[in-house]
Amino acid sequence: MRSRKQRSPRRQAIGVRASLALLVIGCILPMAVVAAFLIVDFYTRERAQLLASTVTQARAIMAAVDSGFARTEAALLALGTSHQLQRGDLAGFHSRAVEAQADMHADGIVLIDPDGRLLLSTRRPYGERLPKLASAPLLKRILATGRPGVSDLFPSPVDGQLIYTIGVPIRRGADAAMTLNATATPARLAGLLAERSLPRTWRVAIVDGSGKIAARSHDIERFVGRPTTSALQRQLALADEGGFETTTLDGIPVYSVFSRSATSRWSVALGIPLDELTAGLRRSLAWLIVATLAALAAGLGLAWRIGGGIARSVQALAGPAAAVAAGVVPEIPPLALREANELGLALQQAAASVRTAQAERRESEQQLALAAEAARLGIWVRDLVQGKVWVSSSWRELFGFLPSEQISVAALLQRVHTDDCAAVRRVLALADTGERYEIEYRVALPQGGLRWVASRGSCETGGDGKPRLVRGVALDITQRKLAELAMQQKQREVTHLARVATLGELSGALAHELNQPLTAILSNAQAAQRFLRQATPDLDEVGDILADIVAEDQRAGEIIRRLRRLFDKRETPLQPAAVNPLVIEVLRLLRNDLLSHGVALSTVLGAEDAHVLADSVQLQQVLINLLMNAVDAMAMTDAGARAIGVRTGLDDEGWLRISIADCGSGIPNDALDQVFAPFYTTKDSGMGLGLSICRSIVAAHGGQLWAENNPDGGASFHVRLPLAAAAETAAP
Ligand code: ADP
């Protein structure tokens, strides 16, 4: 799980070249997109402008056509007023019309009566019989409106050629009696288109009022007279001006712009090939693509070269970096990048520092080893991951292992004294969980003999927080330990002596106490003798007397046993002891002494059933000492006022407290702690050891002993002890 996590960033890592390539792409592509957008936007505006100007052109062509029609109309109107026509001299008018026709840009002039009969045509000699018009919409319109007009294309009744006419009414009185028409072939309009010098690729058409093509920029012969595209016809039906995409009759996709004349109803349509319209855009976009690709290629090429340079510089530092860890100052080849050179320099400095640090570490390790050897300090390291143990030579010496012997935890445990084995196992297990430890234990040396060793160790954790190795030191403390044991022995002896001394003080009272049962036994025995000397001894009475003797003897025996226990030098292990019975036994022991000193005793035994782990005899010794001191302290107190209060109970923290209060001299405040110092005494015959021994006994029981003065005179001594746990109390 962990290793997968560690590997994943490496799998994602990309090289310098790829990074730079991404940078290049990241810079160029957005610019290309923006440029494309700007180009398209520019061409959209251009196209809109072009189309707007094309509408103007269409309008201009239409205006030119209309003005041609208007000029012809004006000329016809002028001709219509000629006196030959007014006089009805048609022959003369024919000649006049032939002359006028040349200036009129017309192919012929015809005079038509209201029935559609041609009265004369300049294209025929005067007098020749002329045909009648089949249908004459223009004639009808002119006669109806009395205004000039332009016809659509139609085949000439004279020679069948496609023509259009411009007609004006000839009035006789108020009404139009005839129409005078100028006829022209579409070729005249074609000339007009040629004059406009429009782009050759554009398709231009002039369309008559009925939607037929009157003139065209291309293929005029093929298309003239044919209806224009239905798309244009539809647009013309909707509006007089506009633009739309369509396909011309010769199949070219164009954007067509048209304008229709309001007077003649003829139209002009301009078709710009779509190809042409988008050619610029396509060309610009193509250039953009080419430029982008070229920039990309150049950028990527550059990125590849620069990236290669950086990669080589970085890779060239990999070897030197590895050398740093070994403390070797690496050679740095000249590198292309300044930063890489600086890094190389830093690596060299780091290597020098590492080397110095390693030298210093070696030196300090040597010093440490020397110090450890001098102090006979054994050093050991236990690798929890690999399960290996390393120890110094002093350690081997300490535990009696030969230099060649393999060290393991099991081998160590074999050396440990059997009584200490469990404790050593426990602390080793603790160390495995990352805890610090300290322990003192005995080592059974293979060559015989015991050695006391103090060992302490602590655990180091790895990056994952798990214990990795335990390091520690072991020190030979045999001398100290032996001295300590000797000291303890001495202390025990002193304690015993103190106890004997205490008992010496008690002996008067004890003699008195023993005296009572012995006197009772004696008088009972004498009484029995008397009874037995009678003639008829009362055996029942003798039996009772003997029972009393046995009881008194048992009492004396009990007193002697108690004394023997106190004299006993043996140390007994700590055992659960009921507190109140223990206190009562001490008070019973001292009862006579207290009585003989005239001391009134009051007890409040509150800690019922309380047990403490104790050496009962030692604890009794403490209480006897405190009570005897209390009696001593009241030597100067009035006989009637001597009193000692003994109290047992639990304090706020659930510990047992035994307090002994007197109403004696009390203790000077600055001596409240001093009284516990060894050899501190205010008594002529005192040794000053009692309280000091008491305090060390209580401390050995895990408790405290202290003194304080009572508010109403006298001193109190308090013993505070931890209660025995329920499980311990239950033990036998
Ligand atoms: P010793 O009894 O031999 O003097 P202790 O160590 O028992 O030695 O007592 C030391 C001193 O403490 C005593 O000499 C006395 O001055 C003082 N002391 C002990 N108990 C009391 C007490 N109950 N009231 C006043 N002083 C006391």
Image (cartoon, rainbow, N blue to C red):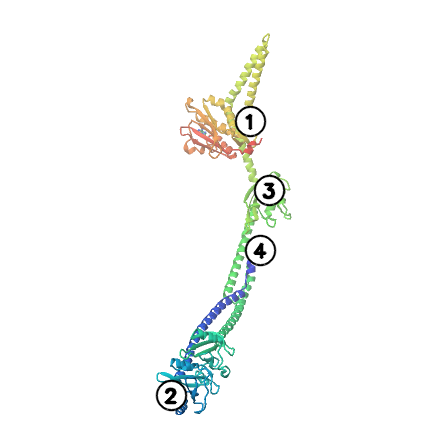
Q: Nearer the viewer, residue 189 or 526?
A: 189
Q: Which SS class for mark 1?
A: helix
**Tags 4 and 1 in contact by the CB under 8 Å rule?**
no
- Asked if residue 663 is positioned above or below residue 116 in the image, the reply reads above
Q: Report which residue position mark 4 lands on.
A: 4
User: Extreme front residue here?
Assistant: 115
Tell me where residue 196 appears, x and y as whole percent. Answer: 43, 82
Identify the amino acid type marked 3. Arg
Q: Report which residue position mark 3 lands on.
A: 425
Instruction: Indicate which label's residue lies in the foreground, 4 or 2.
Output: 2
Marked residue nearer the N-terminal end (4 or 2): 4
Q: Report which residue position mark 1 lands on.
A: 565
Residue 79 numbered mark, or none:
2
**Tags 2 and 3 in contact by the CB under 8 Å rule?**
no
Marked residue nearer the N-terminal end (3 or 1): 3
Real-space Cα distance between discs 2 and 3? 143 Å
Real-space Cα distance between discs 4 and 3? 36 Å
Instruction: Indicate which label's residue lies in the foreground, 3 or 1.
Output: 3
Q: Is residue 327 visible?
A: no
Instruction: Indicate which label's residue lies in the foreground, 4 or 1.
Output: 4
